[in-house]
Each structure stands twice: as structure tokens, then as C-alpha cells.
Image (cartoon, rainbow, N blue to C red):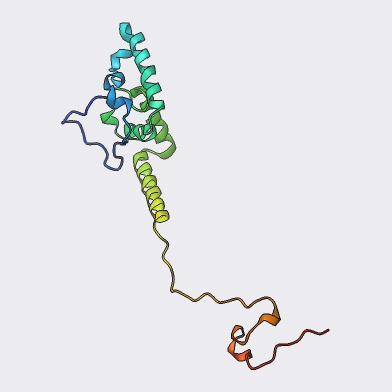
Amino acid sequence: MSRPHPTDPAPDPRFPFPHTSAPTRCRRDPALFDLASGDLSGDTKNAAQARLEQARRACSACPIVTACLRWALVNKTLTTENVFAGTTPAQRRAQRRGLADRLGPDWTDVLAARDQAHRARAEAARSPQPRGPSRATPTTPPTSRSSWTSSDCPPSTRSRKPETPPP
């Protein structure tokens, strides 16, 4: 993967480039992922195909491949060449067309809204649930009537004798 040129447009800030603490193959061997448009035709076709297959295998084992593909799809002008998430520029163009067909021409906005909703749900799940006012838990009287004491009965029934069951 080549580095963006300073005059290239900025990436969409709603989709940050994925990072991982694990060393990825594209960081260790970026030349493997560099495929120019003409590489897949003519004399260099076989060598380029072999490199493309190596890059795809490397991407298939990558922990951030899904986020990398999303970044590459959203940032069209930054990914016109090279392999991102095991895909070629032509494959990414086809995927963008499919996304536009399914989600509409503003598919990046749809994905950004979905991501925001997902983050909000995840944050709500991590946050402690607000508690209402503290209430004392009512005590349950013992199940055997013979073990009841006057403190187990409500105040209005303390003066009455407990009923004895019929024989």
C-alpha cells in the first residue's frame, strides 16, 4: 500500500483507518500490496497474479481486514490502486456499486449512521444502568405459622392471635 500524497484528499473522518497492535503484513512488506493498474496485463501479469494471491492470503489472516475493506471502500480517491483487504481496485469499484444499489447513492452516510448507532448501543451496554431510589426489600415471613413471631406480622395484626387451622 502506498502512502497518500500530500495533495490527495483527506480520508473520511467518520471512518478512521484501522489500527492494531499486531504487526500486519502490509506494514512489514508494503511492496507485496502495490499493484499498479497495468500490472495485471502484459508480460508482468503472471508475477502480479502471484503477488496478488500472496496479498490475499496475507489479508485473510489479518485481524483488521473488515475495517480495512470498509476504509478502502469509503475512501475511493485514496484507494484507486493497490490491494486493500485482499481486493483489487476493480473489485472495490464493483462492491461500491453494490452498496449504492442496496443502500442508495449516499451509502457512506448510511454506513456512518449505522456505525454511530452501533457505538451508542455499545456505550449504553457498558454504562451502569441508573438506579431508582433505594427501597428496603420487604422481608418474607417464614412459611411455617408456628415459627412466626410478632415482629413478622404487620402492625395491624400483632394484637390478634394467629388463626389455628381446623383439625
Looking at the image, which residue is at 38% across and 53% down? Answer: 123
Looking at the image, which residue is at 36% across and 34% down? Answer: 64
Residue 80 visible in this rendered orientation of the protein: no
Q: Which image quarter: residue 60?
A: top left
Residue furthest front in the image: 147
Q: Is residue 137 left or right of 156 when viewed as pictured?
A: left
| Front residue (pair 139, 4) | 139
From this view, report whether residue 141 is shown above or below residue 31: below
Provide residue 122's location: percent of width, then percent of height.
40, 51
Looking at the image, which residue is at 36% across and 21% down? Answer: 55
Provide residue 31's location: percent of width, then percent of height.
27, 19
| Image quarter hosting the N terminus | top left
Q: Is residue 53 left or right of 158 when viewed as pictured?
A: left
| Front residue (pair 122, 116) | 122
Provide residue 82's location: percent of width, then percent of height.
30, 22
Q: Which image quarter: residue 62?
A: top left
Provide residue 93's location: percent of width, then percent of height.
36, 27
Residue 47 visible in this rendered orientation of the protein: yes
From this view, report whether residue 77 is shown above or below residue 118: above
